């Protein structure tokens, strides 16, 4: 379970997160939606202990990420890019991560298989496409077979087959009782994949609930999103 409570973050004179609260629960896929600059990545970074909050709490099963006893088996995260040095092979990168995290080397072949990179595992990451890099980042997040996945824009760069694969993969994770929190700009995709929705706008939560609750009378996630964020349809803000 991920619990964010009254989280605020100030950068200089700007408050980029203002008292946000929400939860991502086991057995459910939760989408974190909002326009560019709304505060999604900032929130996820605080959850993962990569940044600090000005006030409030962001807890993983009741404790801050930094105090987790076994973080790799508790939380897997995918933020920007693959996380691998360009001169490394995917296999080399994952082996290094597994060794650093005290995980069995056999996990490397398993996660490469899960994300569909087995045949490209010995290639250097510099030759990877954007989508292959995302798959490698996901493989790294899965090394510890974590209870919780935190994914920033997981379908970014994936082709249609990859998007469909990701949808099934995330649904399967939730079906086994795991927690999935993802940020996304792909509203149609969200409608097909998630159980719960949290919408953030200018650093404030403007809606949260189950997918049907948030869609409400708007008819679609897309309509609800535009109504809640005031973003003009058909162009950037
Ligand atoms: N390192 C930083 N220094 C200063 N301001 C930052 C920094 N990182 C983010 N911000 C600001 O914080 C706000 C929230 O940014 P954040 O990246 O969390 O938004 P986001 O919702 O993830 O956006 P996107 O959809 O574009 O990824 C923005 O106004 C951004 O300019």
Image (cartoon, rainbow, N blue to C red):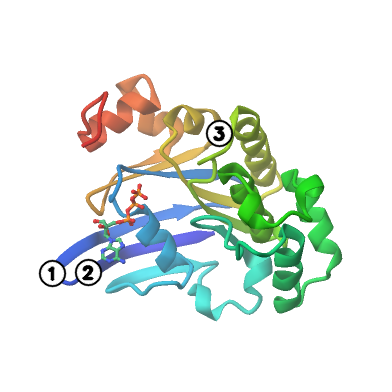
Mark 3 or mark 2: name the one nearer the start of the chain: 2
The residue pinned by badge 3 equals: 193
The residue pinned by badge 1 equals: 13
Which is closer to the viewer, label 3 or label 2? 2
Q: Residues within 10 Å of mark 1 (few under 14, many from 20)?
A: few
- Marks 2,1: beta carbons within 8 A: yes
In the figure, 178 relative to 192: above or below? below
Q: What element does badge 1 sit on?
A: loop
Q: Position of residue 141 (x, y in %)?
A: 64, 59
Tell me how far mark 3 sits from mark 2, CA to CA. 33 Å
Mark 1 or mark 3: name the one nearer the start of the chain: 1
Tell me how far mark 2 sits from mark 1, CA to CA. 7 Å
- Relative depth, front residue between 37 and 63: 37
Residue at (55%, 43%) from the top-left corner? Answer: 29
- Marks 3,2: beta carbons within 8 A: no
- Residue ranking furthest to the left: 13
The residue pinned by badge 2 equals: 10
Choose top left, top right, bottom left or bottom right for residue 17: bottom left
- Residue ranking furthest to the right: 106
Residue at (81%, 62%) from the top-left corner? Answer: 107
Residue at (37%, 53%) from the top-left corner? Answer: 40
Q: Residues within 10 Å of mark 2 (few under 14, many from 20)?
A: some
In the figure, 82 relative to 113: above or below? below
Viewport quadrant of the N terminus: bottom right
Q: Position of residue 142 (x, y in %)?
A: 69, 57
Q: Position of residue 19 (x, y in %)?
A: 25, 61
Instruction: Specify the label residue 149 is tagged with.
Output: none
């Amino acid at each position: 379970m991920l619990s964010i409570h009254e989280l605020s973050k100030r950068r200089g004179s700007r408050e980029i997160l203002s008292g946000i609260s929400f939860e991502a629960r086991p057995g459910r896929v939760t989408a974190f939606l909002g326009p560019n600059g709304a505060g999604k990545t900032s929130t996820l970074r605080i959850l993962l202990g990569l940044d600090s909050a000005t006030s409030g709490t962001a807890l993983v099963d009741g404790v801050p990420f930094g105090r987790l006893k076994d973080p790799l088996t508790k939380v897997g995260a995918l933020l920007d890019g693959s996380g691998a040095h360009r001169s490394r092979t995917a296999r080399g990168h994952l082996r290094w991560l597994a060794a650093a995290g005290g995980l069995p080397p056999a996990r490397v072949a398993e996660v490469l298989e899960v994300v569909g990179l087995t045949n490209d595992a010995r290639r250097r990451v510099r030759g990877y496409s954007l989508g292959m890099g995302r798959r490698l980042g996901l493989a790294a997040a899965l090394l510890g077979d974590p209870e919780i996945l935190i994914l920033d824009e997981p379908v970014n760069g994936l082709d249609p087959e990859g998007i469909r694969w990701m949808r099934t993969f995330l649904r399967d994770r939730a079906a086994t009782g795991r927690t999935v929190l993802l940020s996304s700009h792909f509203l149609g995709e969200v409608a097909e994949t998630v159980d719960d929705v949290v919408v953030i706008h200018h650093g404030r939560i403007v809606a949260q609930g189950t997918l049907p609750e948030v869609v409400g009378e708007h008819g679609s996630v897309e309509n609800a999103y535009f109504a809640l964020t005031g973003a003009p349809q058909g162009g950037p803000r």
